[in-house]
Image: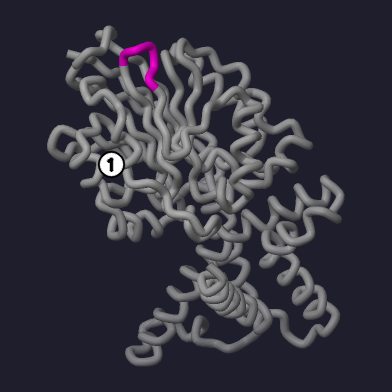
Amino acid sequence: MSLFFIIFFTVYTTLNYYVFIRGWQTIGNYPIIKIIYLISFILIAYGYVFVKILYKVLPPLIYDIWLGVGAIWFAFLVYFILSLLLIDIVRFFDSKFQFLPEILRSSEDSIKRYTALIVIAVVSLIVFLGNLNKRNIEIRSLELTVPKGQSKLSELNVVMASDIHLSPVDGEKLLTRIVDKMNSLNPDIVLLAGDIVDDKAEILEARGIGKSFQKLKTRYGVYTINGNHEFINGVEASVLYAEQLGFRTLRDDYALIDSSFYVIGREDRVMPQFTGKQRKSLKEIIRNINQDYPKILLDHTPVGLEEAERNNINIQLSGHTHHGQIWPANLITKMIYELSWGYKKKGNTHYYVSSGAGTWGPPVRTGSRSEIVNLKIKFE
C-alpha cells in the first residue's frame, strides 16, 4: 500500500507541476503575484491531502471548505492537463507545418494571458456542467427472471445503489434526494454495494450526515457491504456507523430473507491491504446455505465475474468503477473491467455494475451518470 501511495503522489505531483509551471509562465515579472500564486496553488492542489492529515485539529468549517476545494481541483486538474496537452500538440505540429496565424505564434505575454483565460473559462464551464450532471440521479430499471426454487415469493422489488461516498462534500443534501428517490420506488429491500462513506465515521456523525437513511421504508430492511472506502476510512468504525443507521453489513456472510431468498455479502478485495487478512472465497461463504433458494450477491469490485457463475449465484450486484466518472476515465474503465457499467449475463448469472449514486473526489460527472437501480425480479 505504501508503494501505491508513493507512485500516486509522484505522478500527482508531476501533473500538478506541469499545470503550475504553465501558469507561472503567464504571470510575468510580478514577484508578489507569483508568491500568492505559489502558495494558493499548493493549498488548493494538495488541499484534499492536507485536510485528511490535519482533520483532528482543523475547525469543522475550515475542514469542509478546504476539503471541497481540494476535491473539485481534481476535476480542474484533469481538464487543465488535457487542454495544455492539446495546446502543446498543436504548437508542435505548427512548428513543423506553420499553419497557425502569425499572431498565435507570438511569445508576447499578452497572448499567453489571453490563452490562459480562455483555458480557465472552458475548463470552468466543463466542471460546472459536470457538477450539474452529477446532481441528476437517474433511476435505471431492470426486469430479471430467476428460478424460484423453494422461495415462497413470486416477485421481489429491489432498490440498489453503490458508491454514495458520503462526506462533507456530498452530504445530507445529496442523501435526502437519494432516499426520496428510493422510497418512491416502494422497495421490498434496499441493497447497497459498498463505498457508502467517503470520510471517517466520526466526521460524518459530527455533521449529522447519514440521518436521512433512517427514513428509508422497506419490507425487509437495508443490507450493505464494505467497499474499498470503508476500509480506507476505518472499516470497524464504518461498520458501526452503518449499524447505527439501521443497516446490516454482510462481511463474508449471508442472510436468508423471509425464508425465500439469500443476500450474500463479500468483503472488498482490498481487505488484505488494510487488515492483513484474506477475504473468504465465495465457495466458502455459501458452503452451508440451501442451494435451492435464489441467491443475490453483493461484491463491490466487479472482478472475477466467473466466480459467481461457477457458484450458481443468480444475481451479482457491484459498483466501484463509477464508469469512469470523469471523461476520458470511462474509456479506461471499459478496458480494465469486463463489465464497467450496466447489465450482463454469463451462463445463468445476471450481473449489474452500477456507476454509483454519488461521486468520489470532485462532485463532477462528465463520463457517466449518477444512478439508483430498480431490479424487478420474478421468481419462476
Under circle 1, the secondary element is: helix
Q: In the figure, residue 191 lies in which quadrant?
A: top left
Q: In the figure, residue 70 lies in which quadrant?
A: bottom right
Give the image's coloring scheme: one colour
Left or right: 324, with 33 as reference point: left
Q: Does residue 44 sit above or below 28 in this rendering?
A: above
Left or right: 208, with 214 as reference point: right
Q: Is residue 157 visible?
A: yes
Q: Does residue 160 sit above or below 87 in this rendering?
A: above
Residue at (70, 55) in percent of width and height: 69
Q: Position of residue 193 (x, y in %)?
A: 44, 36
Q: Which residues are magenta?
A: 256-260
Q: In the figure, residue 299 lies in which quadrant?
A: top left
Q: Position of residue 306 (x, y in %)?
A: 21, 46
Q: For the residue marked with disc 1, what is the amino acid?
A: Lys
Q: Position of residue 132 (x, y in %)?
A: 54, 40
Q: Is residue 137 visible?
A: no
Residue at (30, 54) in percent of width and height: 337
Q: Nearer the viewer, residue 51 or 243?
A: 243
Left or right: 13, with 277 as reference point: right
Q: Position of residue 204 (x, y in %)?
A: 71, 38
Disc 1 crowd rating (10 Å Cα; few below 14, some 14-19, many 20+) is few
Q: Nearer the viewer, residue 328 or 150?
A: 150
Q: Nearer the viewer, residue 285 or 338?
A: 285
Quadrant assignment for the C terminus: top left
Q: Nearer the viewer, residue 279 or 353?
A: 279
Residue at (71, 53) in percent of width and height: 67
Q: Which residue is mark 1?
A: 283
